[in-house]
Amino acid sequence: MKFSHIGIPTKERFEGEIDIPHLKITVSDHANNPFGIQWMRYWEEAPYPDIVKTIPHVAFEIDDLDKAIVNQKIIIAPNSPSPGVIVAIIEVNGAPVELMQIDRSVYKADLPNKSI
């Protein structure tokens, strides 16, 4: 498991905003800093649970998403936000945790992953 980023919800505008219309969210680039900090503003019509829209989440890159979500409380089912990436969000101790399975042959972005 490798740390990818921390997503911090906000209702305020922030520098370097990136709109992602198909996800109804605006984010900052978590790869632009060595700590993987990503600001996230959910659009009013964003169809996500309040826990995701209001509590910061940590994200980890994992090898096998199906295996990683066994016996977990899934709050956002596995989905593909971009080519080569499959994610799910689980709840752990009252906080959202994003698990990301990335096919590097398809997804070429350089993520600031940190080994744990």
Image (cartoon, rainbow, N blue to C red):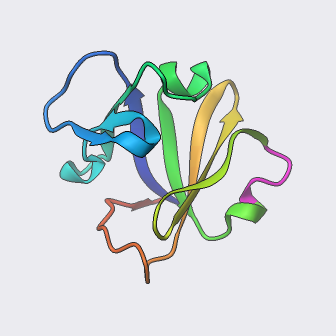
Q: Nearer the viewer, residue 66 or 21?
A: 21
Point out the residue furthest to the right here. Answer: 71
Q: Residue at x 43, y 78 (%)?
A: 106
Q: Nearer the viewer, residue 40 or 55?
A: 40
Q: Is residue 69 left or right of residue 59?
A: right
Expressed as whole percent of the image width and height from the top left, the position of residue 25 reads: 39, 34
Q: Nearer the viewer, residue 25 or 99?
A: 25
Point out the residue furthest to the left here. Answer: 15
Q: Is residue 28 above or below residue 47?
A: below
| Chief secondary structure of the magenta portion | loop
Expressed as whole percent of the image width and height from the top left, the position of residue 74 reads: 74, 40
Q: Is residue 100 left or right of residue 115?
A: right
Considering the image in quadrants, where does the N terminus appear?
bottom right
Q: Is residue 103 above or below residue 77?
A: below
Q: Is residue 57 above or below residue 104?
A: above
Q: Is residue 27 left or right of residue 91?
A: left
> How many numbered marks appear?
0
Dividing the picture into quarters, in which one does residue 94 lie? Answer: top right
Task: Please state the extent of the stretch shown in magenta in the rendering.
Answer: 68-72
Expressed as whole percent of the image width and height from the top left, the position of residue 109 reads: 31, 68
Q: Is residue 80 above or below residue 71?
A: below
Q: Residue at x 45, y 41 (%)?
A: 23
- Residue 32 covered by magenta stretch: no
Q: Residue at x 83, y 54 (%)?
A: 70
Dividing the picture into quarters, in which one does residue 18 lie? Answer: top left
Q: Residue at x 47, y 28 (%)?
A: 56
Point out the residue furthest to the bottom here. Answer: 105
Expressed as whole percent of the image width and height from the top left, the position of residue 17 reads: 20, 36
